[in-house]
Image (cartoon, coloured by chain):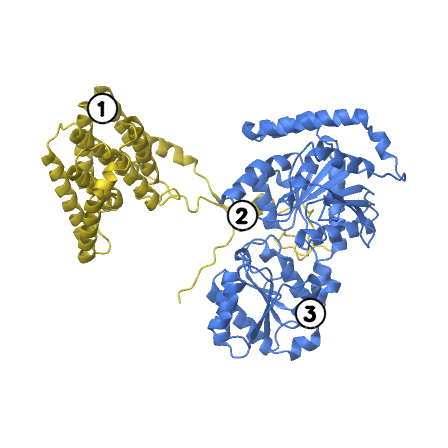
Chain colours: A yellow, B blue
Amino acid sequence: MTSSPTGTWQKILYRKQAFPDNYSGGDAQFLKELRKNVSVVHYDYKSAVYGCMNFLTHLDTLTMYFVLFLNILHSNWSPNILYTVFVSTIALYLFFCKFLAVVANSREHARTIVTLFLFAYAFTPVIRTLTTSISTDTIYSTSIITAILSCLFHDYGVKAPVVSYPTSVSSGLSSAIFLLSRLEEDTPTLLLLVIAFTLHAYGAELRNRMFHVYPVVSSLIFTVLSLFSVYCISSFSVELSVFWALLHVFILFVCPLILILKQTGKCTIHGPWDEAVPIKSMN
Amino acid sequence: MERKIGPYSIALVSDFFCPNAGGVETHIYFLAQCLINLGHRVVVVTHGYGDRKGVRYLSNGLKVYYLPFIVAYNGATLSSIIGSMPWLRKVFLRENVQIIHGHSTFSALAHESLMIGGLMGLRTVFTDHSLFGFADASAILTNTLVLQYSLINVDQIICVSYTSKENTVLRGKLDPNKVSTIPNAIETSLFTPDTDQFFKNPTTIIFLGRLVYRKGADLLCEIVPKVCARHKTVRFIIGGDGPKRIELEEMREKYNLHSRVVMLGMLPHNQVKQVLNQGQIFINTSLTEAFCMSIVEAASCGLHVVSTRVGGVPEVLPIDEFISLEEPVPDDLVEALLKAVEKREKGKLMDPNKKHEAVSKMYNWPDVAERTQVIYQKAVETGSPGRLDRLKGYYDQGIGFGILYIVVACIIIFWLKILDIFDPPAKNRLKEKPKSQ
């Protein structure tokens, strides 16, 4: 065996070295190029709470939609409230287009509103009677299930493989359409349909931009919204509203704490064996 | 070597063998041949390929068992444990095997025979030929579900480069002292330079390899037009086929490079030398590579290699003299290629014959076989862990999947006992007795 003249071990294969084959530089050299946690993100408690707030805001808006629907269905609330909500939704949408949208194009947005409204108006009788023959219990449970599905795929401002805008919007809309079949008249159906559409199609972007641009205002809005939703639920069931409040506390404060405690265990390993990512040059 | 090692009776087990062609297949073939030359008794165990089933002898006297197992995915067999166990046991007993040497992480047959052989009390060696990341789902699954459990009870492990060793140690949670590094080799007499063409041909850059993402076909696609734009005469020859071939042909069309970029398509392995001899510079754009035999083949043909700095590639050839390394960035590789072209035009590249001589000394199969038999000796000399220790090994790897492995091991032990009663090992070991089954 020809030995290397220097006597120090090198990480090369083309020359036989005076070391046994199972030697690889000892502790100093072995795994020298190992790097850990190169791309790991560590969150702080505050940003985690804000993230949960974002999530809860969506849950609250969905709940408020159900509350609104039930109150309209049982005629607890006058239709005027519905008109108010409708107008404020449209106003919010315009506000979003004007101040928050990344690409501002007011004319395009106005056209979208008119088109959607006209289509919704034309198809309301069809949509309202689509699932009328199905029993109310089935409708409610299906609606809840599709709403949960929509929440799972919803975009809460975090890039994750599970996020899917089309799935979220279509399951959210179908949840609304199932509910609407319980209504008797066309006008509230139309209004609720448009509200549902704006909520699901533009809600995510509006909320994420709001939390990004005005975090303090958004957290105030969230507080009001969550208190109001707890209050509204209490008119249907006190137990449920207590549960809802506890759920808020758990998600808002305990879940981020768990994340903070658990994220110290994050560990990814990188080294020369990783598949390289070819960097494309700009043409 | 102070004293003679062996002779041992060795079974090389892998799903991948002739008639397939590839790195693992060539490795097993040449290793077996050189081990036979060293006086060992070697059989190869693999699964059947189409009509090729049963026992075959290759022209170099190598005995190959093509066992009739179901091929499930990517050329790897379906591990049925009790279905294949009697076959493997019979082969190991008949051939009086002492050492089972499995090849390739992807080969289910290798893992299976290592497990069964280990429980039969035979010595086990495993060679890892590939690198895995730790990020994608398939790697995580193979690491935590198969490799970690399979390797814990293997006596000795061989890797083809130091990077591969680090990778395997991390993946299998192994003791680094159990893992040895023995590089691949090539049959350098098959890859000789052609001085005439080397000096008289116009400057030509060669690419050989499957045209897939992992081999860096996208990089190649960007490099070729840039080099052609900056140098007026340089030619490219691209050999190989794959899903990215269309993109390369589009590139050739778009930049109107038909006269300068030759695409040969799929090449049989015996034509590689002829193609390599036409050029002076070899480009390797792989994104991950444990050893990379093709750059050694190119260097043996006297070509200067330009390669991406990935995996075990930096360990393979002396940097600057034989190989220029760059990060996998098109512009850097273009620079490196142009520098190499300039060197060639000024006649500064190493003489191809000298280079061939040097590579022949670096890598040859007899040397690999000699180093491998040292590993075999180590495996034989260290005491084999008992069956209970093996079960404990699985247990220590984590109880979740460990239970499954323990159950499977218990089933194997049970069937081994049963088979030992009805088909005693002593009867099988009688050799030179014609058997037909």
The residue nearer to you, when weighing B329 against A54, is A54
Q: Residue at x 52, y 57 (%)?
A: B213
Query: On screen, B276 above or below A169?
Result: below
Q: Earlier in the sequence, mark 1 or mark 2?
A: 2
Element under disc 2: loop
Residue type pointed to by label 1: Ser
Residue A25 seen by the camera: no
Element under disc 3: helix
Label 3 vs label 2: CA separation? Answer: 40 Å
Q: Residues within 10 Å of mark 1 (few under 14, many from 20)?
A: some
The residue nearer to you, when weighing B248 against B133, is B248
Specify the quadrant that holds the C terminus of chain B: top right
Counting from the top left corner in percent of width and height, residue B93 is at 80, 35
Specify whether disc 3 shares its chain with disc 2. Answer: no
Q: Residue at x 44, y 61 (%)?
A: A280
Q: What residue does disc 3 label?
A: B274
Q: Quadrant of residue A67?
A: top left
Counting from the top left corner in percent of width and height, residue B391 is at 65, 27
Q: Residues within 10 Å of mark 2 (few under 14, many from 20)?
A: few
Nearest to viewer (mark 3 / mark 2): 3
Q: Residue furthest top?
A: A239
Label 1 vs label 2: CA separation? Answer: 57 Å
Disc 3 and disc 2 in contact, CB within 8 angstroms: no
Q: What residue does disc 2 label?
A: A32
Subunit of label 2: A
Left or right: B127, with A150 as reference point: right
Q: What residue does disc 1 label?
A: A241
Residue type pointed to by label 2: Lys
Subunit of label 3: B
Query: On screen, B319 above or below B164?
Result: below
Q: Residue at x 33, y 46 (%)?
A: A166
